[in-house]
Image: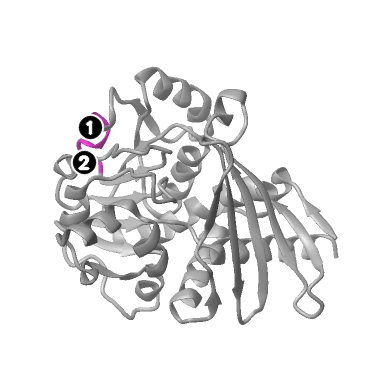
Amino acid sequence: MIIVSGDEIQGLLAMNDAIETVQTAMIAVSAGRATMPLRSIMEIDGTNRLGIMPGALRDPDVYGVKLISLFPGNPAKGLSSHIGQMVIFDNDTGAVTACLDADALTAIRTAAASAAATRVLARQDAQVLAVIGTGEQAMRHIEAMTCVRDIFEVRVAGRTRDRAVAFIKRVGPKFPDLTFVAAQDARKAVQGADIVCTVTSSVTPVLHGDWIAPGVHVNAVGASIPNMQEIDHGLLMKSALFVDYRASALAQAREIIDALASGDMDKAHIRGEIGQLYAGEIAGRRDDDEVTLYRSLGVAAQDLACARRVLEIRRLNHG
């Protein structure tokens, strides 16, 4: 059995490669070439959780399950809030063939998915990025956004301005060509931004629709289970909404569930899955004033495709 560490994954899977890999996987999902039961969440102690994400992709075939602990207090201990393993099985025998660090895999594939969506939804002249959140996903999203747009300025907002300042001191040197600004709060961060990424673990909205100007593209990433919510009702309703996987969005995106229950929104408000857009089956941004929203839940197909790619590169490197 192959064991692949987080450091090895980061060394093997470049962000540009991950973006292409995820985009291909999402086309497969929307074409029906994937089996993906909804993510299961097991409560541990009222704060911490275990996430279970099984799935299978076809052509080429790969199947497995991601087991990931969600411990929001971990960053204070210098650890990732998402820790676990991606287990890959042999297609012929069912035996476990590989275990990959789920922390690194999740961080890269999530940002790559946002970048793939941004590439087809954000205005071509988008240059100013706002990131709400100061964890690993914030850093990865900055890296990913620079792969698909000519970003020159990044505004960062955390729970406090001090957190944003500390993040910039830690991460800024990795991006010497970018200008970083520590915003006083999220509202200040998004003023004048062309692209906004929310990458928090908040249970209440951190981004409001009346803060978002015409033409902005939003990647709402952090709320992957129904008791979390990063964006408010107003942003949902004013946006052209695209999702990674319709079944997940309808069952696990809090703001979508609430809007449907209230009758303010019907299912037709979802323009479609991002894989349909990549495949040219649906239209994306209609004009430069439209607000576009990519609501990311994260799906097993992204993990499977990136794990397969890591193992492929590893085999090539080892002869």
Is residue 123 visible in the rendered structure shown here?
no
State the residue at coordinates (38%, 44%): 228
Q: Which residue is mark 2?
A: 208
Q: How many numbered circles are shown?
A: 2
Residue 206 locus on image (x, y percent): 29, 37
Up-down relation of residue 145 to residue 34 (above or below): above
Residue drawn 21% across the image and 67% down it: 269
Q: Position of residue 247 (x, y in %)?
A: 40, 69
**104 or 204: nearer the viewer:** 204
Q: Which mark is residue 187?
A: 1
Q: Quadrant of residue 56?
A: bottom right
Q: Quadrant of the C terminus?
A: bottom right
> Where, by quadrant of the figure, is residue 164 drawn?
top left
Residue, x 33% and y 52% (percent of image)?
254
Amino acid type shown at disc 2:
His
Q: Is residue 118 a member of the stretch shown in magenta?
A: no
Quarter the N terminus occupies: bottom right
Q: Residues within 10 Å of mark 1 (few under 14, many from 20)?
A: some
Looking at this view, is 179 or 308 the one in front? 308
For the point 43% across and 56% down, the residue is 297
Q: Secondary structure at mark 2?
A: loop
Q: Please state which of the two labelled residues, at mark 1 or mark 2, is closer to the viewer.
A: 2
Residue span colored magenta? 188-193
Q: CA distance from mark 1 to mark 2?
A: 8 Å
Contact check, label 1 and label 2, Cβ < 8 Å? yes
